């Protein structure tokens, strides 16, 4: 495994697309202050990975059968089958080799199932050998509504292609608007060795009657002792951050 290669490299194919950004532990300031300050579990999950954005502002409208789309470069709504980002085809062909002319990825593509659309971010990603990329909706980040994004795990060390998501529209006859300044996806590199270990493992199942003395001791530390005294808020968060800094074991 090449440990000198970047863990994650983004390629921006659409010049106007907002570059990916490190995910924010406060979800762009939308997390309640108490959760951000004291709940390390929520903050850690929220800040893991990078935000990826829609390349342009656009809207989708589903009438139950057909899907229509709109952006500022279109006069009105256009029936969607497969659509390119405005201006990208010419930009791609100008940069690509002769044998790759015309192979710019589509921006939007309707899928076979009702209400499903594939959305490309204008970004391509490559990970270090042995690492995959978990593609998901932004963790704990308020979404505008009207759609849900499917999650996926892509072997981006082998598969070099568009970083896209499949979304399912959840309402009809009303425009669903996507803003280029709001995260569309959150991507998180994952070592495939960890994924293989998860697939191969079988979790053990214990009960109250089979809990060991060490389990009861840990329960005392985590639950009983704090309940008997005035534990300061955020004790877990403080301990987790100290462990991350190597201060405590």
Image: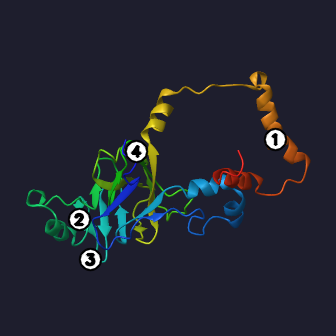
Q: Nearer the viewer, mark 1 or mark 2?
A: 1
**Which residue corresponds to mark 1?**
221
Mark 3–mark 1 distance (CA, rounded to whole Å): 60 Å
**Residue under the point 13% across and 61% down:** 102
126 left or right, relative to 106: right
Q: Secondary structure at mark 1?
A: helix
Distance between mark 1 and mark 4 Cα atoms: 36 Å
Residue 199 is labelled as none
Residue 167, compared with residue 217, is above or below; it is: below
At x 36% / y 45%, what residue is drawn?
A: 2
- 1 or 4: tag closer to the N-terminus: 4
Q: Is residue 131 left or right of residue 224?
A: left
Find out whether the residues at labels 2 and 4 contact each other: C-beta distance under 8 Å. Answer: no
Q: Earlier in the sequence, mark 2 or mark 4?
A: 2
| Closer mark to the observer between disc 2 and disc 4 | 4
Residue behind mark 3: 73
Which is more N-terminal, label 2 or label 3? 3
Classify 10 Å Cα crowding around label 3: few (below 14), some (14-19), many (20 and above).
few
Q: Nearer the viewer, mark 3 or mark 1?
A: 1
Q: Nearer the viewer, residue 69 or 155?
A: 155
- Horizontal and vertical percent for residue 235? 77, 54
Residue designated by label 4: 131
What secondary structure is found at the residue carrying circle 2? loop
Where, by quadrant of the figure, is residue 103 drawn?
Answer: bottom left
Count how many numbered circles sit on residues in the image.
Answer: 4
Q: Nearer the viewer, residue 151 or 8?
A: 8
Residue located at (28% from left, 50% from top): 160
Q: Which residue is mark 2?
A: 84
Mark 3 and mark 2: Cα distance apart in space? 12 Å
């Amino acid at each position: 495994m090449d440990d000198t290669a970047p863990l994650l490299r983004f390629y921006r194919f659409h010049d106007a697309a907002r570059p990916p950004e490190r995910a924010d532990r406060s979800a762009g300031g939308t997390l309640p202050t108490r959760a951000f300050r004291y709940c390390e579990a929520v903050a850690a999950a929220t800040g893991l990975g990078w935000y990826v954005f829609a390349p342009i502002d656009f809207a989708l409208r589903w009438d139950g059968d057909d899907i229509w789309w709109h952006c500022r470069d279109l006069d009105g709504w256009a029936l969607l089958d497969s659509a390119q980002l405005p201006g990208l085809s010419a930009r791609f062909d100008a940069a690509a080799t002769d044998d790759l002319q015309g192979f710019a990825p589509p921006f939007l593509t309707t899928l076979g199932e009702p209400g499903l659309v594939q959305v490309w971010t204008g970004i391509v990603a490559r990970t270090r050998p042995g690492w995959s990329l978990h593609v998901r909706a932004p963790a704990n980040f308020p979404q505008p509504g009207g759609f849900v994004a499917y999650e996926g795990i892509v072997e981006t060390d082998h598969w070099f292609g568009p970083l896209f998501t499949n979304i399912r529209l959840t309402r009809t006859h009303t425009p669903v608007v996507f803003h280029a300044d709001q995260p569309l996806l959150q991507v998180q590199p994952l070592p495939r060795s960890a994924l293989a270990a998860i697939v191969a493992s079988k979790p053990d199942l214990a009960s109250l009657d089979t809990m060991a003395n060490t389990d009861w001791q840990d329960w005392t530390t985590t639950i009983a002792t704090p309940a008997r005294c005035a534990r300061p808020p955020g004790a877990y968060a403080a301990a987790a951050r100290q462990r991350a800094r190597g201060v405590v074991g």
